[in-house]
Image (cartoon, helix red, strand yellow):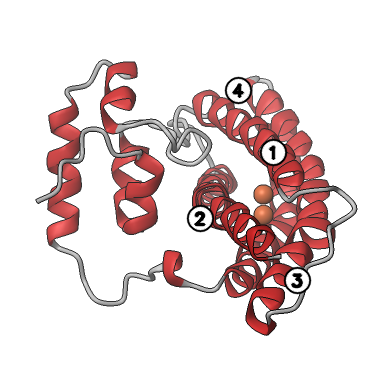
Amino acid sequence: MENLTEKPIGQIVAEDYRTAQIFKNHKIDFCCQGNRSIQEAADKKKLDAQVLINEIKAVQQGKQEGTIDFKSWPLDLLADYIEKKHHRYVEEKIPVLKPYLEKLCKVHGERHPELFEITEHFNKSAGELAAHMKKEEIILFPAIRKMVQAKQTGSKLEKPHFGTVQNPIQMMMVEHETEGERFRLIDELSNNYTPPQDACNTYRVTFALLQEFENDLHRHIHLENNILFPNSAQLEMELSSEN
Ligand SMILES: [Fe+2]
Ligand SMILES: [Fe+2]
């Protein structure tokens, strides 16, 4: 079996998404900081790298058919998938979560003041994510689709107005980092989405939804940072050397 110690964690997750849960359990960020090796990630968390490797191998050995291999997908299909699955998810859940959080603050804010902070972070995230996804949908993803088309038809690729896809990609990655950090704080403030003893049903539902939102965001950012973006930059290089 391959030596995993020096392998970047983003790549491990890209090859088998089920390993994401292992990194989540150890609170290791595999999306925004996916370029770190297992060794580096383990050192940072003061963990034995071998523990992580054993858990990853156990998942890999149990690899079932049906794990979606996003790495083999054409990039235009992956961009469509991200838009239709993850962007729409964010758009649908924000208007559900906002009133829940507002209600929680009103009813439980006095006893659980951290709810105000969680709500503030979430609202900030909601606004910035909406703008972020629009930039991807209007600027970056259409440029990726154009590159795929140029490759398929052998036509010359016109230089985009932003120069190279590396520019919007850099900007998107910085924004991912900000969102990742915000959700790390929400995770911490909510005690890893654990409702308190006196929590009502709304409290439980809201925390479960927030956790689902964070998980979806991780998967979304992972697909962009570790697969769509590097492969698009690579395609751009290939096309420019052909022209
Ligand atoms: Fe996105
Ligand atoms: Fe993004």
Quadrant where the C terminus is found in the figure? bottom right
Which residue is at 80% across, 50% downward? 130
Observer-side mark, 1 or 3, equals: 3
Q: Residue at x 36, y 50 (%)?
A: 13
Residue 63 in the image: x percent, y percent? 19, 65
Q: Nearer the viewer, residue 241 or 183?
A: 241
Location of residue 239 with respect to 45 vertically, above or below: below
Amino acid carrying label 1: it is Gln
Residue 112 marker: 4
Tell me the mark number nearer the camera, choosing from 2 and 3: 3
Helix, strand or loop status at disc 2? helix
User: Which callout, 2 or 3, points at the residue further toward the start of the chain?
Assistant: 3
What is the x, y in percent for residue 150? 71, 75
Nearer the camera: disc 4 or disc 3: 3
Q: Residues within 10 Å of mark 3 (few under 14, many from 20)?
A: some
Q: With 13 as the anchor, is 185 left or right in this view? A: right
Numbered disc 3: secondary structure: helix
Q: Nearer the viewer, mark 2 or mark 4?
A: 2
Q: Mark 1 or mark 3: which comes first in sequence? A: 3
Residue furthest right as drawn: 161
Residue 236, horizontal then vertical, whole percent? 66, 58
Distance Cα–Cα, label 2 vs label 4: 40 Å
Observer-nearest of 104 and 10: 10
Q: Which residue position is annotated with label 2?
A: 227
The mark nearer the N terminus, 2 or 1, is: 1
Residue 146, label in figure: 3
Q: Which mark is residue 170?
A: 1
How far apart marks 1 and 3 lie (CA) works out to 19 Å
